[in-house]
Each structure stands twice: as structure tokens, then as C-alpha cells.
Amino acid sequence: QVQLVESGGGLVQAGGSLRLSCAASGRTFGNYAMAWFRQAPGKEREFLAGISRSGVLKYYTDSVKGRFTISRDNAKNTVYLQMNSLKPEDTAVYYCAADSRIWRVDTVGVGEYAYWGQGTQVTVSS
């Protein structure tokens, strides 16, 4: 099992940047594919980015490609989401997710991931 705790959310003006972190418990972090999702009020949770165990392979949904960057530090048991050029429509609760059974970084289904953090709120003002 792995426990995930997100941090780094907050209020930022449009055009600004934030870096989210997701710290994982346990000594087998490197065995998990990781991903970031978000959920805006009244909307379904949506996939944003996935990263392979080694951190070499990454995949982004079109809406964040070129603005967001996913990365991980297996020595620190942490995955990051660097968010630049933020827009008001990026306002949502952001979640990290993990699963040891996933091998494709373009695995976008919410139900595919077994482990989730509690989420961190990101609010982008116009």
C-alpha cells in the first residue's frame, strides 16, 4: 500500500505558476506509476498527466500540454506538478494517484488507480 499527501495548492492570479507536490509513504514508491488528476465543482475528475516508474515517460492531456510538467524524485518519494500560465478554468481540487499495476503512462481512467491523495485546492483568479 501507499499513502499520498498533496501540498502546494493555493490562490494565484491568471498567468501565474504553482508547483504541487505529492509525498508518498512506503519504501516501494519506485514501483508505482503516478498521475495527477483534477476535479472542478460540478464536473467529473479528469486526468492531467502520467509518469512512468523511472520518470522517463510522461503523458499529458491536451488541455495542459505545454503548460504543466509532471516529474518525480524517487529518492524523495515525491511526484510534482509544475503548473505555468495558469487560467481561471484551471481552478479545481488537484489529486495525485498511484497504482503498481499500471504500465502505460496514458492510463487516464479514474477507476484504474487504486491509491489517491486527499487533494489540494488550486484557485486561479482572473
Image (cartoon, rainbow, N blue to C red):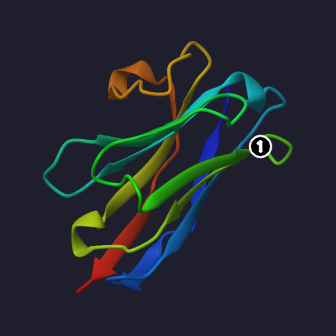
Q: Quadrant of residue 40?
A: bottom left
Q: Is residue 29 left or right of residue 80?
A: right
Counting from the top left corner in percent of width and height, residue 36 is at 46, 44
Residue lying at 41% horizontally and 55% vertically, measured from the top left: 94
From this view, report whether residue 66 is shown above or below residue 98.
below
- Viewer-closest of 51 and 38: 51
Q: Is residue 75 left or right of residue 97?
A: right
In the picture, the quarter occupied by the C terminus is bottom left
Residue lying at 31% horizontally and 83% vertically, measured from the top left: 14
Give the residue number, with chain letter if any, for mark 1.
77
- Viewer-closest of 95 and 83: 83
Q: Quadrant of residue 57?
A: top right
Counting from the top left corner in percent of width and height, residue 108 is at 36, 29
Q: Is residue 75 left or right of residue 19?
A: right
Farthest left residue?
42
Q: What type is the residue that disc 1 sits on?
A: Asn
